[in-house]
Image: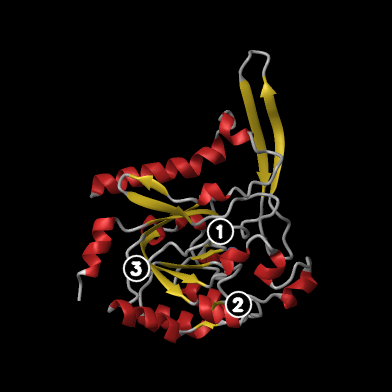
Amino acid sequence: MLNSLRSMVCIIATLVLLPLCCGADPDTGIARSEPRNDKTANQPVNVTRQQVVDLSHTFDKQTIYWPTENGFRLIPEKAGITEKGYYYSSNRFMAAEHGGTHLDAPVHFNEKGKSVDRLPLQQLMGEAAVIDVTAACRQDPDYQISVADLRAWEEKTGRQLVDVIVLLNTGYAKYWPDRKKYLGTDQLGPEAVAELHFPGLDPEAARWLTEHRAIKAIGLDTASIDYGQSTRFQSHVTLFKHQIPAFENVADMSRLPISGSTVIALPMKIGGGSGGPLRIVAWLPSEDATSGSRKEP
Ligand SMILES: [Zn+2]
């Protein structure tokens, strides 16, 4: 078990680090000019006997950032055959910490909160508890996920939200990268902030989770853990007071069962960072585990 976990972590670390550091990798330079919205990149892959689902959006020109932020920039530097005959490419990138699929570290809204590099790995890996609120969010773009929604998961599974990574599936990932549908506005600048409409976590539910349950982390497929119309960001404040990080702009979760999948969410390890780009994946339960859980009463 330990060995398989170790090799799992190695594979994930390689996947995260390769695109960030290796300018000489020919694969990284090919799609430099065109934004990649390659759906096949998000198809599940088989690793050992389990399928792994990519829950991160690609960082490119279309990546959604807060209306007051600049977007992601890939700055081409070199691409071509060198004098010595080998191909070489390398780029620079510029990005705000908070945009695209990313992690909010507690220090984002808590002066004494942990920065992204200080978050323990235990909080970034664990079983996913997927809360399906797609129907409610389809009806109401200002929907706030309630204590009742969280308790519905507990009733269905017969378990408490303890030692899990809570993933709120609002269904908004399917609107990505259409800013108008995803954020409620495609305007930019400070005035656009009042026009934001998308679902988030009710501050009361954040309070309940931190006072009555013990979760590792929480994520959702909208631009903020507080809903678009929030002005005081109280779910952020409450979660981060308790050192619980949040994942935002998570990609499509529809392949995940409500329990039993394993999430690994590794942000870029920025020293002192208030957050950072996040590669998040989910290991689906194996066939055996699924049929095993079906036998349970
Ligand atoms: Zn953020």
Q: In the displayed orientation, state which residue is furthest to the top.
A: 84
Quadrant in the picture for residue 47: top left
Residue 96 image point, x, y percent? 66, 55
In this picture, residue 84 sits left or right of residue 146: right
Q: In the image, what residue type sits under mark 3? A: Ser
Q: Which residue is mark 2?
A: 227
Dot 1: element? strand
The residue at 57%/60% (across/down) is 274
Residue 227 image point, x, y percent? 60, 77
Q: Give the CA distance from mark 2 to mark 3.
A: 25 Å
Q: Give the CA distance from mark 3 to mark 1.
A: 23 Å
Q: In the image, what residue type sits under mark 1? A: His
Q: Is residue 90 above or below residue 221?
A: above
| Residues at marks 2 and 3 touching, judged by CB atoms closer than 8 Å | no
Q: Which residue is mark 3?
A: 259
Which of disc 2 and disc 1 is earlier in sequence?
1
Q: Is residue 80 above or below residue 99?
A: above
Quadrant in the picture for residue 181: bottom right
Q: Nearer the viewer, residue 258 or 4?
A: 258
